[in-house]
Image: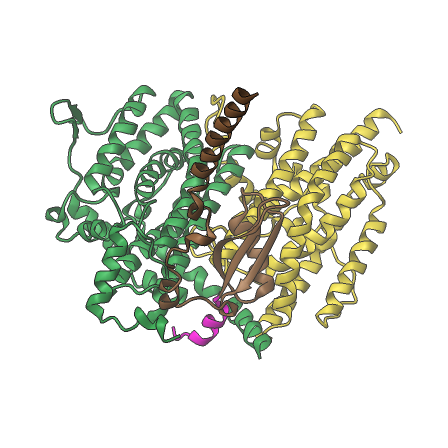
Amino acid sequence: MSFSEKNKAMTELLYQLADDDFIHAHRGSEWLGLAPHIEEDVAFSSINQDTMGHAAMYYKLLEDLGEGKADDLSHRRKPEQYRNAIILEERNGSGEYLESPQYDWAFTVIRHFFYDVSKKIRLESLKQSSYEPLSEAARKILTEQYYHLMHWEVWFKQLMTSTAKARKKMEAAIFKVWDDFGGVLTLGPYGDEMVKAGLIEDEEVLKTRFTERMQKYFQSVDFKLVTEPQMKRGDGRAGVHTPDLEHALSTLSEVYVSDAEAAGW
Amino acid sequence: MKKDHHESDAFYEEFEVFSKKKDGSPIQHQFSLLAPNEEMALIMAKENFFRREPAVDIWVVKRSNIRKLAQSEKEALKKLDKPYRETKGYADLNRRWRAFKEKGKDEWLKGEKEA
Amino acid sequence: MIEQLTFDVLNDEQKYQHFMERINRGEKIEADDWMPDDYRQALIRLISMHGISEIMGALPEKEWVPKAPTLNRKLAIMAKVQDEMGHGQLLLRVAEDLMKPLGKNRDNIMQDLFSKRLKFHNVFHMPSPTWGDAAVIAWLVDGAAILSQTMMLDTSYGPYGRALKRICQEESFHAKHGESLVLSLAEGTDKQKQMLQEAVNRWWDALLMFFGPKSKNETGHSNVDKNIKYKLRTKTNEQLRQEFLTKYVPKMKLIGLDIPDKTIRFDEDKQEWIYKEPDWNEFKKIVSGNGPKTNERLHLRQSSYEQNEWVREALGHISSAAVG
């Protein structure tokens, strides 16, 4: 494959990785001060910081490839230029984060748990990436993934095996996340080129690993799900997004774009 | 809104958190936290108390499993001096060694003269 | 066993005398030790207010977590607000242990907050409409908090002292973070400088109020004397306010900020700052739960607490099931 084909595959993959972590960390951080109890608030925030830190590492790799400044890439692109999965941009619940947010903890636990399971599988594959800076980043990020996964696994198992009310909320959240989780597992329109360039393994291979892993978790809490994860609202890797992303980005970039003359913040 | 305090009491269990700073150091008490069970207490402990401080091991112990001293018992820990089992009870040793050294010098000098 | 009953056989007066001797010798009182009700109540009032102020203090800054301008600023402010929540955790644990013999727990603290029985610091009732406010909070509100917390490090209550020690260690990061935010705006465009100055104008009175009134003449009551007698604190409100002005007024002037008090000056003879008194009636109004943002922030905290009730119920269920 030509240099420009390979370069396109590489930047597309890096945007997916960066944008996934960026928007996911943002949704998590909106919980700051509002989690079910104070100790969890503190613990959850560390996970969001780590994840935002991972996004910053990927944006830096894009900067090194000449795509522009990391802060511009994260704060100045148009919504259709983002490559994150749609399920990750979804609001935590109805309401603004400052006014009567009706956040759903079950949805948050499920989305974070599924995401961290898939993220670990993806990182294991990226360790073998032909692009050395990416494989090195993957190795670093993996060191933080163990405790993130442990955190959500504890929440998942406990809420799934507690009261009937909690079980019902958790199952509803599983179905909701499953409907769009295919969007996290896909490599998007340039997936074949990414695989050809040796950047990452085939998405079908990764997807199988994920579903097998999830089946084990489901069995451990006596839950069954026979369908594959879907992509009902479209492919974020292809630039398809919901109004939730646009709304989030206008908040995230409000200050950064407020003064065109500003050299520093 | 009517609340069931029994449930929230069960959620708010007290756990004491201990940690080991680095390989070879002793386990030390850090602080306490509220969590519904051991597993939760552990995942909370790490980020609540070791965001910056290093830790190579973390323990969580349910407070109700700790037998502590009552105040009378603590007061009773104050001991009378037992000088015979501390170094300060043997403060006279230096003086006595010095005496031997002085004497030894004299003995030696005496020997020199006689020879 | 019989020999060990010596402390238990003392009457209340003797226990009180024994307690005050310990305080005056500089010994530290621990949660399970005997203490007079008056001391316990003073501690509960002081520490639960301090703790809940940290929790409520996370809210005005939290508004700026997603809006922080760069990746690095987003990370740093997240870490800082997380620390505030962490400080709240430490302090509430200390308060909860003191309240336990009275049959109360964290849930009671939350309910007291929602019903406005439990008060929180005046500064956290105020709006923070711009990024400049985030910078001023991080630099000056935290700066004020550092001074009052450092003063209490040697408090007679052991658990409070240990919590403050952890808190003060983290505050050194907060101080740098605040300076960095303010300097970036002060070095920036006219628009950025103006944003900073306007935030200072908004916060000045609240900062002076932060340390509390000089004496009870201003607000009708004060717990300062009692807190000094029990060695919970070592300095008066006014001493702290003077320290604050000495530390920050010259720095503010150095970076080109106007102090929003034309009369402020340092009196060389008296060796103290002369400044315009803030409106103490306004202070009373704010801390009793009628500040500009009080109801909105209480609503935010209360609604999230109630919405997550099912989580605490579910896991409380696991805990009791596991114990049998």
Query: Which quadrant, please, contains the C terminus of chain B?
Result: top right
Q: Is residue A244 visible?
A: no
Considering depth in this image, is C270 or B110 the residue closer to the camera? B110
Query: The chain drawn yellow is chain what?
Result: A
Considering depth in this image, is B81 or C184 the residue closer to the camera? B81
> Which portion, as a residue range, is magenta?
B1-13
> Residue at horizontal 27%, vertical 73%?
C9
Residue at the far bottom: name it.
C324
Query: Which quadrant, please, contains the N terminus of chain B?
Result: bottom left
Q: Colour of chain B?
A: brown
Q: Is residue B12 magenta?
A: yes
Considering depth in this image, is B57 or A137 the residue closer to the camera? B57
Q: Is residue B59 magenta?
A: no
- Is B36 placed above or below B106 here? below
Q: Is residue A134 visible?
A: yes
Residue C7: image location, x then y, percent: 30, 68
- Is C59 placed above or below C143 here? below
Query: The chain drawn green is chain what?
Result: C
Q: Quick check: C204 left or right of A83?
A: left
Q: Quadrant of residue A23?
A: top right
Residue C305: image location, x then y, percent: 44, 62
> Residue at horizontal 24%, vertical 53%?
C230
- Is C28 placed above or below C196 here? below
